Amino acid sequence: MATKTKAAPVSRKKKYTAKELKEFKALIMKKLEKAKEEYELFKGNISGLDDHGTDDTSPTFKVLEEGSEVLSKEENAQLAVRQKKFIGHLENALLRIQNGTYGICRETGRLISKERLKAVPHATLSIEAKMAQ
């Protein structure tokens, strides 16, 4: 006798509930706080505030250290720029929560899956839309 499997219901929701949005907001706030801490760390490394300098070491070591320091500052600058962009994406996600458009794919107009938003809370595209790009 063949068994009939029931298909999973397709969600017809247009928006996430207030409770769900509150959960997403908490997740975003946590990520935002961590991102800002990391951004400040990168900025500190660039400006030399966290400098563990070589002022009292031999001249030969100092030349090698200065070359490494320039590279490190460039890397930190790139990381800081990237982190600042990430912070902007998270802040925009908070704005979308406020204006009621959070979790809606900007290409398809359908809800982005909860799983995707938990992994990438600032996502504006569903997996399908992202794959189509």
Image: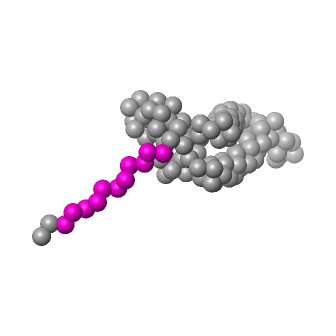
Which residue, as the protein is rendered here, is positioned at the far bottom? 1
- Res. 120 image quadrant: top right
User: What is the span of residues highlighted in magenta in the rendered image?
Assistant: 3-13
Q: Residue at x 49, y 51 (%)?
A: 115
Residue 123 to residue 2: above or below = above
Residue 5 colored in magenta in the image: yes
User: Is residue 24 visible to the viewer in this orientation of the structure?
Assistant: no
Q: Residue at x 43, y 48 (%)?
A: 11
Q: Residue at x 46, y 38 (%)?
A: 110
Q: In which quadrant is the N terminus drawn?
A: bottom left
101 on left or right of 46: left
Q: Residue at x 48, y 45 (%)?
A: 13
Q: In which quadrant is the C terminus drawn?
A: top left
24 on left or right of 40: left
User: Is residue 102 visible to the viewer in this orientation of the structure?
Assistant: yes
Query: Which one is nearer the viewer's eye here, 9 or 111?
Result: 9
Secondary structure that dominates the magenta span:
loop
Q: Position of residue 21 (x, y in %)?
A: 62, 49
- Res. 132 image quadrant: top left
Query: Which one is nearer the viewer's eye here, 48 or 60?
Result: 48
Q: Position of residue 97 (x, y in %)?
A: 65, 41
